[in-house]
Amino acid sequence: MFLENKVDKSEKRGWIEVIAGSMFSGKTEELLRRLRRARIARQRVEIFKPLIDNRYSDEEVVSHDANSIRSTPVESSGNILFLSSDVDVVGIDEAQFFDNGLTSVCNQLANQGIRVIVAGLDMDFRGNPFGPMPALLASAEYVTKVHAICMHCGDLAQYSLRKTSSDKLVEVGADEAYEAVCRACYQKYLKK
């Protein structure tokens, strides 16, 4: 028989939560909130971010509202496995900047009984799925889609409009380089 009706309640169960949305939608703020609550519950928490994300701090995850939490910057997703022993919760910010191995890493951690909370942009500035995020969204038990407010019309925003002329896929920046826009305003921008 494939599954038995008996489940060992003492067995530690893990899962993946993904917080996705555009720039300025509150992804990191929500990640920080969940991680702080885990610490209040006396859970052992480890937080990671990609080495490339040094906008506000080299060693902290910082929201646009200037809230922060100490983190470990890593160059690749594989490093997360080596650095997350003896923890209950793993937080990962700016997931879109990681390699595609991140999905496998998150699944391995969850299979080990660890709660994995991932935050990242679901789309790049071109409106395409970004990095490992589509696979993470498909693998996650829980998905939270957050929205910003369109800087042009005030509707819900789901696109990150790049204000610079750079065509590079990855350009780390904040409000000097990006603004949140809704679908209609994004379409108007594309027609220019």
Image (cartoon, rainbow, N blue to C red):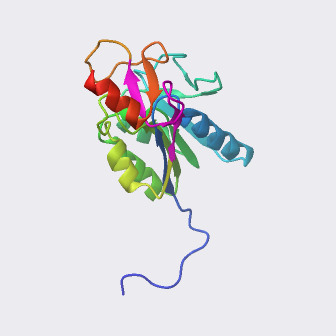
Position of 158 compared to 87: left or right?
left
Q: Residue at x 52, y 53 (%)?
A: 114
Q: Residue at x 39, y 35 (%)?
A: 184
Q: Residue 89: x, y in percent?
A: 57, 47
Q: Residue at x 57, y 34 (%)?
A: 26
| Residue 79 in which image quadrant | top left
Image position of 72 with respect to 109: above or below: above
| Residue 126 in which image quadrant | top left
Number of numbered discs on residues: 0
Quadrant location, the N terminus:
bottom left
Q: Residue at x 72, y 47 (%)?
A: 42
Q: Residue 121: x, y in percent?
A: 42, 35
Image position of 54 with respect to 87: above or below: above
Magenta stretch: residue 146 in it? yes
Q: Nearer the viewer, residue 152 or 169?
A: 152
Q: Residue 22: x, y in percent?
A: 45, 34
Position of 134 compared to 65: left or right?
left
Residues drawn in magenta: 145-162
Magenta stretch: residue 121 in it? no
Q: Nearer the viewer, residue 10 or 124?
A: 124
